[in-house]
Amino acid sequence: MDPLKAFQQKLVDFAARKRRGIRNPFVIVPVDPPYERRMTSILASWEPEPDHHTGQLPVKRIFLDEILPQTDVYRTVVSIPQAALESASASGLGDYDVTERVEQTMRDNLATEIVDLILDEHEDILTVERQIVLLLNLGSLYPFARASELLDEFDRRRAQSTIGIPFPGSVIGGKLAFFGEDARHYYPAHRIDQQIKGRHLQ
């Protein structure tokens, strides 16, 4: 099956509770990175076909690139004056050390802050089972937050809605490779292994 259609179908099946015994109703699908934005535009207007048993499933679309600038950690990092970075470097911290500290701060806090902001506005994700939540434009968070970190946060808070994340990368040997980096195993999400490519978005 076309991987985009397989992704959509699995989201519908989970949200409509057609599949039982699911620990986490999270679904991920790899997308060829150059086509992430085109795929986002398709999902931005996608509405599941109404089912005579379950009716119309609501779909929330959350654009991660729009949430990123709202986070405290992002605003803090971008507000650091160049002079402060140069001063830190001059005081014995090399440019590499300063950059590493800034990047580590982003990695340690970004996923948590993004999920906090999402739930502040969409608290029903924690309680409503029969809806689909799409987290779009994940690539905008690279390399500071990954799909697994966002889903870990939703899992920790016991999200009840079905959450779908297209991620720019591929599945290699059952592991996720984000933007072609080393593959990592992530077990709680249900994945579509075939990568979405340009030909699937015609």
Image (spheres, rainbow, N blue to C red):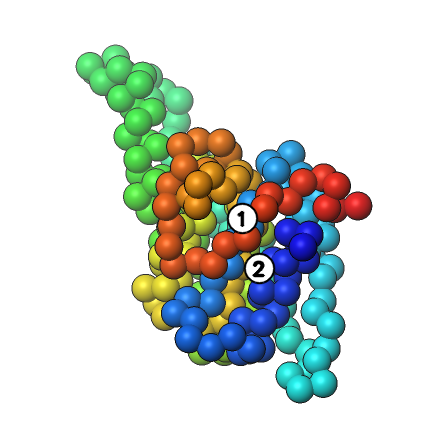
Element under disc 2: strand
The residue that label 1 is drawn on is 193
Quadrant showing the C terminus? top right
Q: Residue at 51% x, 68% y: name it.
A: 162
Q: Residue furthest right?
A: 202
Residue 131 position in % (x across, y down): 57, 73
Whether residue 56 can be seen here: yes
Q: Is residue 122 visible?
A: no
Q: Residue furthest bottom?
A: 53
Look at discs 1 and 2 and give the one toward the viewer.
Answer: 1
Foreground: 11 or 69? 11
**Three-letter code for the amino acid on which mark 1 is drawn:** Asp
Q: CA distance from mark 1 to mark 2?
A: 18 Å
Helix, strand or loop status at disc 1: loop
The residue where tag 2 is placed is 134
**Residue 200 rendering spot, x and y as whole percentages:** 72, 46
For the residue carrying disc 2, how many other residues have a C-alpha within 10 Å: few (<14), some (14-19), or many (20+)? Answer: many
Left or right: residue 71 versus residue 88 is right
> Could you tell me the amino acid type at mark 2?
Leu
